[in-house]
Image (tube, helix red, strand yellow):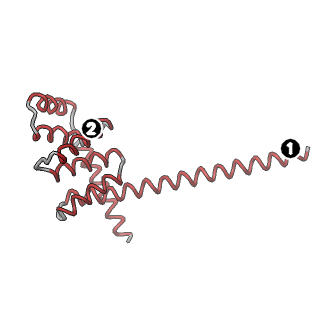
Amino acid sequence: MGETKNAQRQTRRDLDEKLALAKPSRELLEKLAVDCASNPSPDNTFQYAFCLAKSDSDSELRYAVTILDSLVKEGYEHQIDCMYGAATALYLLGDFKASRERCEAILRSKPDSRLAAELHLASIDAAEAAEEAKVKKMAVAGGAASVAVGLACVAGMILAKR
């Protein structure tokens, strides 16, 4: 079990590094946006949205998900790639559950997709890490609250003796 967790964590670290290196430049995004506007086509729209799906801006990531989902609904021929792009954007947004669900949908139709499998494992690990952090934060807050209550009781006892 520990081996699986370590492999999952390593996969997540590797993916995070790849995504950091794949972040598009402003110039590239602007060029693709102009191409998409001046020559509208599903392929140009896909290229723009797929590039946006690796942005560091939350609004651009949400926009990428919207565009890529629309392309899937419209029957765009590269639907798996659209779903992967949306899953990537959701992962970067911190919506690990939705990212994982998209990866699972991809893996059901394309079980040999290495990219989807990698993102799937990273999403699981990120969700578990977020849950662990939440539990630790609650434990610290609970501990602090206990200390505060204890201090209040001690202060009350001291005041009662006077």
Query: SS class of the residue under badge 2?
Result: helix
Return the x and y of residue 36 as percentages of the image width and height.
13, 32
Q: Position of residue 92 (x, y in %)?
A: 31, 46
Which quadrant would the C terminus be assigned to in this image? top right
Separation (CA) of disc 1 from disc 2: 59 Å
Which residue is pictured at 17% across the width and 44% down the height?
Answer: 71
Q: What residue did someone put label 1 on?
A: 159
Name, please, the residue furthest toward the bottom: 1
Count of numbered circles on the image? 2
- Which amino acid, mark 1? Leu
Q: Position of residue 55 (x, y in %)?
A: 26, 39
Q: Is residue 64 above or below residue 133?
A: above
Q: Which residue is mark 2?
A: 63
* Mark 2 residue crowding within 10 angstroms, few (<14) / some (14–19) / many (20+): some
Instruction: Please name the amino acid that badge 2 sits on.
Output: Tyr
- Occupied quadrant, residue 1: bottom left
User: Which comes sooner in the sequence, label 1 or label 2?
Assistant: 2
Quadrant hosting residue 39: top left
- Between 94 and 76, the residue placed more toward the observer is 76
Q: Is residue 113 left or right of residue 65?
A: left
The percent coordinates of residue 23 (x first, y second) are 24, 40
